[in-house]
Amino acid sequence: MTDNDLSNTIKVHVETLYIEAESDPDNDRYIFAYTITIENHGDVSAKLLTRHWVIRDENGKIQEVHGDGVVGEQPHLKPGEGFQYTSGTMLETSVGTMGGAYLMVTDDGEEFKARIDDFLLSTPHTLH
């Protein structure tokens, strides 16, 4: 199986939420939560090893985040299984985007990347 075939077996769904109570727009502090659901739609088990996020705000500021696992875990997903977690980020603008990839490894040691398409982080009622 090629790397591209494996990368399409892991599906990532994202839901975002602006956390108004923790944000401070007067001081350019906008807090967002995101809930990620990772699903294994393939026929081989895979473990999430690392994450890589690229976070952009409206000012063009880019933050890159690299780390082991997600929320302190490295979930192992058998075919048909899923894993869900919630985390958060801070932007200096009311609108931004996030995207990236998870580095996965199959039980037989084959590594591949599961892409996370860019998603929008936006305060309510922001038009763009």
Image (spheres, rainbow, N blue to C red):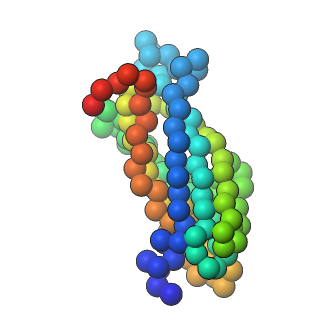
**Residue 106, image x, y percentages:** 63, 78
- Residue 122 place in picture, x, y as percent: 41, 31
Residue displayed at 47% across by 25% down: 30
Q: As drawn, is 108 to the left or to the right of 127? A: right
Number of disc labels:
0
From this view, report whether residue 113 is shown above or below residue 33: below
State the image coordinates of residue 50 (x, y, percent, origin top left).
59, 61
Q: Quadrant of residue 100?
A: bottom left
In the picture, measured across the screen, residue 7 lies left or right of residue 22, that is: left
Instruction: Look at the picture and state if 104 lies above or below 32.
Output: below
Quadrant of image for the C terminus: top left
User: Which residue shows up at 43% across the image and 36% down it?
Assistant: 121
Q: In the image, is 84 to the left or to the right of 99?
A: right
Q: Nearer the viewer, residue 113 or 82?
A: 82
The x, y position of residue 104, in whole percent, is 59, 69
- Residue 55 position (above or below residue 33): below
